[in-house]
Each structure stands twice: as C-alpha cells, then as structure tokens.
Image (cartoon, coloured by chain):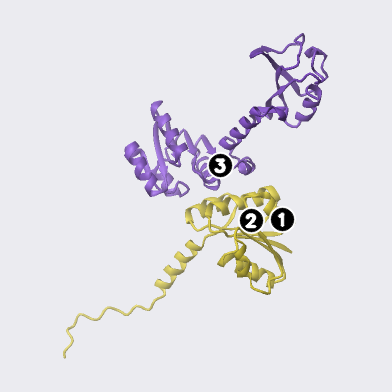
Amino acid sequence: MYLIVAGGGKVGANVASSLLAMGHEVTLVEQRRDRFEALEEKFGPIALHGDATEVHVLERAGINRPPDIVFAVTGDDEDNLVIAQIAKEGYAVPKAIARVNDPRNQQHFDLLGITQTVCATSGILGLVEHEVPQHGLVRLLELRQEGLEVVEMQIAGNSPAAGKRVAGLSLPADVRLVSVTRNGVGEIAVGQTVIRPGDRVIAILKPGLEDSLRRALVG
Amino acid sequence: MKAVVIGCGRVGSAVAQQLAGEGWDVTAVDENEEALARLGSTWNGGFVVGHAMESEILVRAGIESADAAVVATSGDNTNIVVGQVIQKRYGVTCVVVRVLDPRRAEFYAKRGLRTVCPTQTAISYLLDAVRACDIPQPPSSEPVQA
C-alpha cells in the first residue's frame, strides 16, 4: 500500500517506521526544518520537508495517486483536521486517520466528517479510570460509528446484583452483559451465571444508559 | 443584528469597529486579553478572551444568536475549522473566513465556506497596478547627436 504520514514527531516517525517494516511505501511530511533533517537522516528520501496543510506539499507527497491511507498526526488538531479533509474530499483518499491531541476537539472532527480518529489523551484518561475503581463504571471501548460502547463494573457486597442470576436482573432494553470475571478468570455471561461480590462484569450498551446500568448492577 | 468577530488583530479589530459603527451588536474574541486595546477606548461591544476552538468561548460570545461571524485569526487552519464549526453546529449562515493561502481558500470556497483570501487580492491588485503603468516606449534606435 501507499501511505502518507503527515507530521514527523514521535507519533509520525513511529507510525512511518512501523509501516515501512510492514513493507509499505511511505512518504513522511514534516514542517519543522530541524526535525525534518533528523528524519531525512533516518528515513532517507521518503522524508519530505513542508507544511502538509498546503496543497502543493501534499501533491509533492503524491496525494494525486492517491494513497490508500493518509495519517494526519501532527501536534495541531486544526492542521490534522484540514489535512484529513483535503485528502478525503479533495483527492478521494479512501481513508484518513487523524490524531486528536486535545480530546475536547473530538466533537469538531465528528462534526466535520473525520470519523477515524485516535486520541492518546482519551486513552490515557480511560486507563486512569480503569485503575481507579471508585468510578464504578469504566468505559473500555467506544464503537462510535456503531453507536455502542463496552463498559466494565465491579460488583460490591451491597450491590443490587450481588448473589443474583443474570436472568433475574432487571436491565434496560439496550444493555447486554457480556462476561463475568472472578479471580482473574473470565466467563461468558449467560442467564444462569450468578454474580458475586468482587466480580468484574463487562457489558455492551447504547451510550446514555450508563447510569441506569450502574444503578441496576452496582447501586 | 449580531456579529461575532473571531481574532482581534489588525484586521479583526477594524472589522469589529466598522460593523459596530454601522449599528451591529458586535462581540470580539481573542486569545490575548491585550487585543481589547485595539478596539479603542470607546468600544462598547462585547469582548471574550479565549480560543474559538472551545465551544464554551463561542457560546459566551453569543454565537447561538449571531447573524454573522467573521473569522480572522492568524492561523489559516484555525479559521477554516472554526468557520465550519460555526456554520455547521450553530447554523450561522453568514460566516466569512480569512484564509491567506490561495489554494486552501479556493478548496474550501468550493465546499461552501465563504473564504476571503487577502493574498489573492494582493496578487490581483499588484498585477493590475503593473498593467496600468504608463511605460515609456523604448527610445528609437537612431543614434542621438550630441
């Protein structure tokens, strides 16, 4: 495959290295002169100096071919959004993956049709939640396009679900329990599965039902 | 009529003052608090300090009830993104966006954003000015006698 990586910081350089190791053809675009020189030394002629939000720079990078994927992974969210828009809407690039540096900007990417995004900060915040059990409900996975999410909860001794079978729980309609993990061993949740204090329960649900799920299971 | 002007530099502040003079209810937005000084001591419109990528700042500037928005910060891509957000999320129909790079201005103009490109304007004016010059004809080849 042919791929353009826009942004040659830690993220972009590592993405480019991985893609090259997988045998793909890559062009790596970096705006800053000092960074570009270091990249050129490492990657050779596939490094390109220029501002990837400028059309003529993207054209030099081969946007007309077009590439199979454009990775917009600079440290600037506005730049990433513009690169992804130009690639997808201007050059019919089938896939543009954009990095979201500030999770508060996620809504702008969604609004402007850049649906494939990666946000390291959100990932880290998710991990923080995962490590802090007081939060009660941890979001493990967000399937944005499908409109679903996967969450995990820890059952306490006084939780309404403790000691009950899955079939006996009154859960909201758009919620399914997926698994129950006890002493590090996970089992698929079926109707007869009994939930015990200390269990970690994974559920899939429509966004917005987190609170009613939490009330039904954890209290 | 209400206008929000994003970016209160030389251009934004002058646009804000002019619109206010024409009777608009204007709120200017800038990251830098000192930009307020550009609006002059008699400014009685609104002024919000903050980055327009933050929805809260746009809402505080009254974007939800705005009839027009002018986006003229120093960053082309910020202007392009903020302009589209104002158009699509807040439904403001009159959104004018300054984009210095002619190619990007053209690209987004084709996609329904009202872009204004001062670079392109300068190019046209400079060309017109050169064409309008009264260039004297080259001197005739006959040798001039002293």
How packed mark 1 is, by other alpha carbons closer than 10 Å (few <14, some 14-19, many 20 or more), is some
Q: Residue at x 80, y 18 (%)?
A: A161
Q: Is residue B117 visible?
A: yes
Checking the image for residue A35, the label placed there is none
Figure check: A159 above or below A84: above
Query: Which residue is denoted by mark 3 in the rendering?
Result: A101
Checking the image for residue B50, the label placed there is 2
Q: Quadrant of the N terminus of chain A?
A: top left
Most extreme residue toward the bottom, as rendered?
A: B146
CA gap, disc 3 and disc 1: 24 Å
Q: Is residue B53 left or right of residue B66?
A: left
User: Closest to the observer: B87 or A106?
Assistant: A106
Q: Residue B128 at x, y = what percent?
A: 44, 70
Q: Is residue B141 left or right of residue A198?
A: left
What colour denotes chain B?
A: yellow
User: Closest to the observer: A213 or A85?
Assistant: A213
Query: Which residue is denoted by mark 1 in the rendering?
Result: B60
Among the 4 quarters of the image, the one containing residue A16: top left
The residue type indicated by label 1 comes to: Arg
Colour-to-chain, purple? A
Q: Label 3: chain?
A: A
Q: Quadrant of the C terminus of chain A?
A: top right
Q: Is residue A112 visible?
A: no
The residue type indicated by label 2 comes to: Gly
